[in-house]
Amino acid sequence: MLHYLRSPKNILLITVIWSPVVICMTVLVSSLTGLSFSAAAILTAPPMLVELFFCLSSWYLCKTMLPEQKNLVNIILRQGVAALTVTGVWLLLTMSYSEALDFFLNTKIWRVRFDQVFLLFTAAGIFLYFLAALIYYLILSLEKSREAEQQALKNRLLASRTELNSLKTTIHPHFLFNSLTALSTLTKTSPELAHEVCIQLSDFLRYSLVYAGKEWVSVKDELEHIKSYLGVEKIRLGERLTLDFHINEQAMEEQLPPFSLLPLVENAIKHGFQQTIEPGTLTLQIEKYPNSLLILVKNPRDKAARTQTSPGYGLKALKQRLTNAYGDNTKLIINQKEDNFIVKLQIPLEGKNE
């Protein structure tokens, strides 16, 4: 609570909230005792200031007695004892204050007036204590909920990074093995193509090093990455692989988590071109709509190949990462036809979890 009182705005807010309480108590004291409003304020305002500090201090007691379903009755009883104790101390101080007024002003009316409003002060003290405790428990509940949301977000980000690392360890070994196998052959048959494979492979691995630690990258950067990947695969597969890109220019600067496009094209190569010797076209289409980004990857499919009834690990991990980043509106749709395989990824452009 002390950190709240360090702010002048919070002190002003507490003053604004407490002032009507003091005024209401003063009016009640005036009506019950027959004192003028100013005289009633003398008897009421200082004790109410003390009551304010008692109510503020109950914050620490509330923090040590957080309500749970299993000990709710115990908490109520303990808070009841605390309310009676605090109110009793407050009444004792208020009575001493009224006697001090009689002593210094040489009168005998203030203690009498206090006795007249004793029950009012008792009820007000207990009520204000429980009201303050209720407000504090509400604040603590909101803080706990906010902390839980922040922790859940951290867990999702950690899970995304873990999935990303797992995805990289799944894709890179296969890709490196195929690339090095092709490279060993090309060094003997076509040194120029071997040199090109080295350049593309270098660009691919450089991206992995530079962007792996980033939260977001542009669609343009992702395209450069998969072009390096597909450049190597194009040399390895030769005329069996034709590339057909349809990229909306407005989508180029949209932000994605790194390695969002790679699992899509890797899935297309693995299930579309490594299982057949027939030539085919890998189509990549990226369209930007007002509220979403659509990514479509289409590849040929061998009719004799085993039907892929569910997304592979790479696509599942990608879907989970994007769900963590954008929310449950992320959609991964697989459309498997007799001669081709289409993966559609729809990403909402609003509601990104920063």
Image (cartoon, helix red, strand yellow):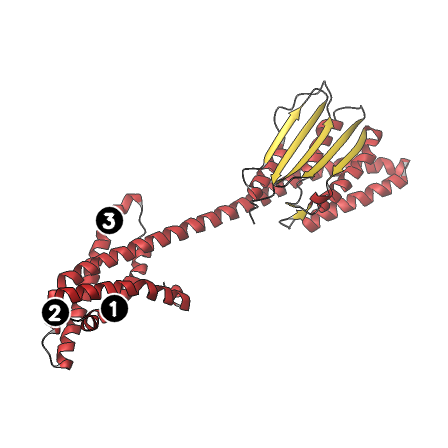
Query: What amino acid is labelled 1 in the image?
Result: Val
Q: Nearer the viewer, residue 239 or 107?
A: 107
Reading the image, the residue beneath label 2 is 113
Query: Can residue 7 be seen here?
Result: no
The circle on residue 74 is 3
As drawn, 208 above or below 57: above
SS at badge 3:
helix
Q: Earlier in the sequence, mark 1 or mark 2?
A: 1
As drawn, 26 above or below 214: below
Q: Quadrant of residue 245?
A: top right
SS at badge 2:
helix
Reading the image, the residue beneath label 1 is 50
Q: Earlier in the sequence, mark 2 or mark 3?
A: 3
Q: Earlier in the sequence, mark 3 or mark 1?
A: 1
Query: What amino acid is labelled 2 in the image?
Result: Arg
SS at badge 1:
helix
Query: Can residue 295 be seen here?
Result: yes
The answer to whether 199 appears left or right of 16 in the picture is: right
Distance Cα–Cα, label 1 vs label 2: 19 Å
As drawn, 80 above or below 43: above
List x then y, in percent, for residue 223: 73, 42
List x then y, in percent, for residue 200: 80, 43
Closer mark to the observer between disc 2 and disc 3: 2
Q: For mark 2, does the 10 Å Cα neighbourhood hold few (<14), some (14 to 19), or many (20 or more) residues? A: some
List x then y, in percent, for residue 87: 20, 62
Q: Nearer the viewer, residue 186 or 202?
A: 202
Question: Residue at position x 21%, y 73% from top?
Answer: 38
Question: Residue at position x 25%, y 55% from top?
Answer: 130
List x then y, in percent, for residue 188: 89, 37
